[in-house]
Amino acid sequence: MFEHLSDRLEGVFDKLKRKGALRDEDVAAALREVRVALLEADVALPVVKDLVAAVRESATGREAMRGVNPGQQVVKIVHDRLVETLGAEAAGIDLAGEPPVAIVMVGLQGSGKTTSTAKIARWLQGRAGGGKVLMASLDVRRPAAQRQLAVLGEQAGVAVLDAIMGELPVQIARRAMDRARKTGIDAVLLDTAGRLHLDDESMEEAARVREASGAREVLLVADAMTGQDAVNVASAFKERVGVTGIVMTRVDGDARGGAALSMRAVTGCPIKLMGTGEALDALEAFHPERVAGRILGMGDVVSLVEKAAETIEREDAERFRRKFEKGRSFDLDDMRVQLGQLRKMGGMDGLLGLLPGVAKARKQMAAARVDDAVLGRQEAILSSMTPGERRDPRIVHASRKRRIAAGSGVRVQDVNRLLKQFQEMNGMMKKVRKMGGKGRLPAGMGTPGAGGMPGQAGIEEMARNLKLPPGLKF
Amino acid sequence: MSEEGWLSRLRAGLDRSSGRFTRSIGAIFAGRRLDDGALEELEEILIAGDLGVATAAALTGELAGKRFDGEVTGEEVRAHLAERIAGILAPLARPLEPDPDRKPHVVLVMGVNGVGKTTTIGKLAGHFAERDRKAVLAAGDTFRAAAIEQLQVWGRRTGCAVVAGKRGDDAAGLAYGALETARDGRADLLFIDTAGRLHNKDGLMAELRKIVRVLGKLDGTAPHDRILVLDATTGQNAHAQVEAFRDMCGVTGLVVTKLDGSARGGVIVGLADRFGLPIHAVGVGEGPDDLRPFDAGAFARSLMGLS
């Protein structure tokens, strides 16, 4: 989402880093770039102005700090300000009060309300100690909107209020709350019709739904690709319906996502959740600290570590760690496990998006044509080997290579390339061991093209060493 | 619905934004010369209209080079900008013109999620059905829950046949079958709906290319029109969308939806400048006949708050 912005700022601050002291003209030059970058990222103009002014005031005349280069100093100031604007900490969904608790979903047409409704319902119901959830579609206008929610309910395993032809939104809301009270439902999600106009009539309808349901939470669903209009949308919903939180959708797109910054700044409402994919489990908490870090190209290392922890099976990790510590050699089975883990963590692109210095690495990857298709082929090659071959790749000679190539639908050269990569990885593992786990990741650990994968050891390394330099090179 | 009715509604839709434009530009130039500060403010106002930094800078740059004698009024500046914007957009205002000799003329409709692809197809089908052109609709969005049902509702409304499979079906296979059906039935037009997809998802984009490839097996020239639907509320990401869909499937034209919403749709200007793709139609309302030909002059003047 924020890659382009961090890309751009990385370029600016790279220039600054090379200079010795923080001079006024350095700050001015950096801020010009910051301003353009933020505007190109669709951050609303008033928000950009505030941000730039605050940073200028804070940076100018500040004494150069010892041991910190001027670039880092400006980065820190911009970062702090971004965090402040995005909100200091993550905010959850308010479920306080006598059940059933109502949550009203509002937003413009096509912002992703219905999908987000199902995601949130599924998430609420699946939490430890989470109660029963009911969803109801109040969209009586778009053809098949109610049907869409019913299908999603089935997929998510969440109850959906049956539709009655000709019923008005407020009536549906009342019926949903009635049903919830009678059947012991804890939370009710009300999916309202998408609005096109920020006009009185449709806003009033949403306000009436809020009133009828007694909802404490009104979540505005907003597309991360929204342009400068984001501020108008957010303030209109805030004023007229009383929005209490924002859900950003399509964060998995490549939009620079300035809308998040703008909406948060003009409404003061926290961004509570973000949609990160089409699958119903693609919903994440919004963490301002991390997003601000990502904006500045400092990487989303905390997210990466958490994601890795969820994804990597404990046993695999444990097995790998034991092997690694004992100094036993790393075999092709390990490589295969790592490839699988990499895919689960969202493939190369998903993973790289979380890492510092990604903008450059991504370009290199694109240039080197390293993509998820390559990972898939490598997995296929490994799957076409016998367990014996994976344990001891030295036995893989010409005829075995031909068989493996035929079995996985690749050329013999591809098998060779994989074996060579494996050797390089193995060599690197030894180097890491010699380094005794201190310091940074060895060069080449991050990209399979260069020969390595970030394994559990590497990730733990990163977790211990959160003060990675912004320009971590792969 | 008369043309007049559409224009006044477009103007009403743009009123929110153009009102601000008018006030702010008026405020800058009231009794002032066109100095650097004024130009910078003007540039910012254009940026706030989603025109993008580059386009805004280019337009203001021209204004700086233009000699206004002494005092300039806000109205003069607006008129000048409207003229320039209309000049950029006018050559691109081209309605969809299916070739009557093709049976059918195949129109592939694509875009990111939630931009209004299915609705656009419904409205286009209605437009051609009214003119006695036989259209077949292919429910190629086999991913989104109830997308097929949504298109079927449009089929009933417009009296067009709908070729549909079930959710999860291969969209390319469905498109192939639909082309056979449309061809056998001597239909004039085939509209193919597709699932919304983010343009940075390579796998999903490859699926789209597969649809194009498979259609080409039945008719080497199909799909004849490859329309990208854009949401007027989208900001600068619209550039990335056009670029990605163009590279993958060769976009031949744009439809811009939700233009009567609160957004200004200013990103169109930057897109026109950069890609030069025809704008076939704009969505200006929620009714079935609210998809209209794009009128560059009216759009530009409305954008700048001029009647």
Image (spheres, coloured by chain):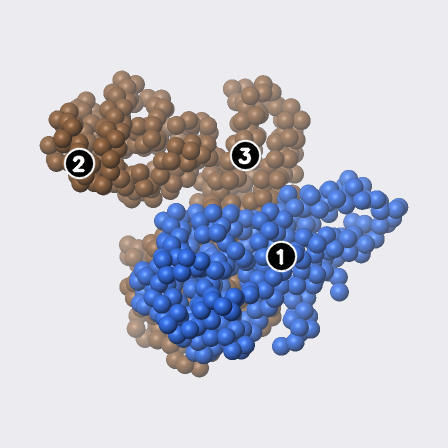
Chain colours: A brown, B blue
| Amino acid at dot 2 | Ile
Q: Which mark is residue B285?
A: none
Tell me the SS state at disc 2: helix
Nearest the viewer among B41 and B1 is B1
Q: Residue furthest bottom?
A: A166
Q: Which subunit holds the residue at mark 3?
A: A
Whether residue B111 is visible, yes or no, is yes
> Residue B264 in the image: x percent, y percent?
63, 58
Closer to the eye: label 2 or 3: 2
Q: Residue furthest right?
A: B70
> Residue A328 in the image: x percent, y percent?
17, 24
| Amino acid at dot 3 | Leu
Tell me the SS state at disc 1: helix
Q: Quick check: marks 2 and 3 in contact, CB under 8 Å? A: no
Residue drawn at 57 percent across, 69 percent down: B291
> Residue A428 in the image: x percent, y percent?
28, 22
| Amino acid at dot 1 | Leu
Measured in 3D between alpha carbons, the distance from the residue under mark 2 to the one under mark 3, in whole angstroms, is 46 Å
Q: Residue furthest left?
A: A388
> Residue B231 in the image: x percent, y percent?
54, 59
Measured in 3D between alpha carbons, the distance from the residue under mark 1 to the one under mark 3, in whole angstroms, is 35 Å
Residue at label 2?
Answer: A404
Label 3 crowd (10 A; few <14 / some 14-19 / many >=20)? many
Whether residue A95 is visible, yes or no, is no
Q: Quadrant of the C terminus of chain B?
A: bottom right
Q: Quadrant of the N terminus of chain B?
A: bottom right
Measured in 3D between alpha carbons, the distance from the residue under mark 2 to the one under mark 1, in whole angstroms, is 54 Å
Residue at label 3?
Answer: A9
Residue at label 1?
Answer: B92
Q: Which subunit holds the residue at mark 2?
A: A
